[in-house]
């Protein structure tokens, strides 16, 4: 299992003063979304597979402000390094 950290850069967008910003909604396919104050979130114990991460700015009603951004990624299966026989040398005297 892997830890996945999703983050996004931000850019300015002018919206009416009446818009009440709640925070950033960060989602990864099949995982529970997180609402955070900064556009970064960690997801623990993510299994191997193909995923899409998306980041949206949302208002107090959960409506998206601006355009959500997303990226596809793959979590590879965990591997380990082991030592296996390579060259056998025999000395006879």
Image (cartoon, rainbow, N blue to C red):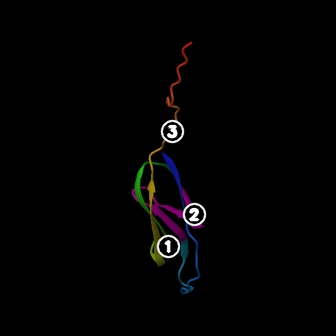
**Numbered disc 3: secondary structure:** loop
**Which residue position is annotated with label 1?**
58
* Crowd band around label 3 with a 10 angstrom C-alpha radius: few (<14), some (14–19), many (20+): few
Task: Give the numbered dot on residue 80.
Answer: 3
Distance from label 3 to label 1 (Cα)? 41 Å
Q: Nearer the viewer, mark 1 or mark 2?
A: 2
> Which residue appears farthest toward the top when viewing the image?
93
Q: Residue at x 51, y 25 (%)?
A: 88
* Crowd band around label 2 with a 10 angstrom C-alpha radius: few (<14), some (14–19), many (20+): some
Task: Between residue 40 and residue 32, name the one nearer to us.
Answer: 40
Earlier residue among tags 1 and 2? 2
Q: Residue at x 46, y 67 (%)?
A: 71
Q: Quadrant of residue 93?
A: top right
Earlier residue among tags 2 and 3? 2
Distance from label 2 to label 3 (Cα)? 29 Å
Residue 32 among magenta residues: yes
For this view, does 93 lie left or right of residue 33?
A: right
Position in image of residue 37 (x %, y %):
59, 67
What is the span of residues highlighted in magenta in the rendered image? Answer: 23-42
């Amino acid at each position: 299992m892997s830890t996945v950290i999703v983050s996004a850069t931000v850019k300015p967008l002018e919206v009416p003063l009446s818009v009440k910003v709640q925070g950033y909604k960060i989602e990864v396919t099949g995982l529970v979304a997180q609402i955070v104050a900064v556009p970064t979130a960690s997801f623990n114990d993510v299994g191997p597979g193909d995923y899409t991460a998306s980041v949206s700015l949302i208002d107090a009603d959960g409506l998206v402000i601006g355009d959500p951004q997303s990226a596809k990624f793959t979590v590879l299966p965990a591997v380990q390094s082991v030592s296996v026989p390579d060259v056998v040398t025999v000395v006879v005297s």
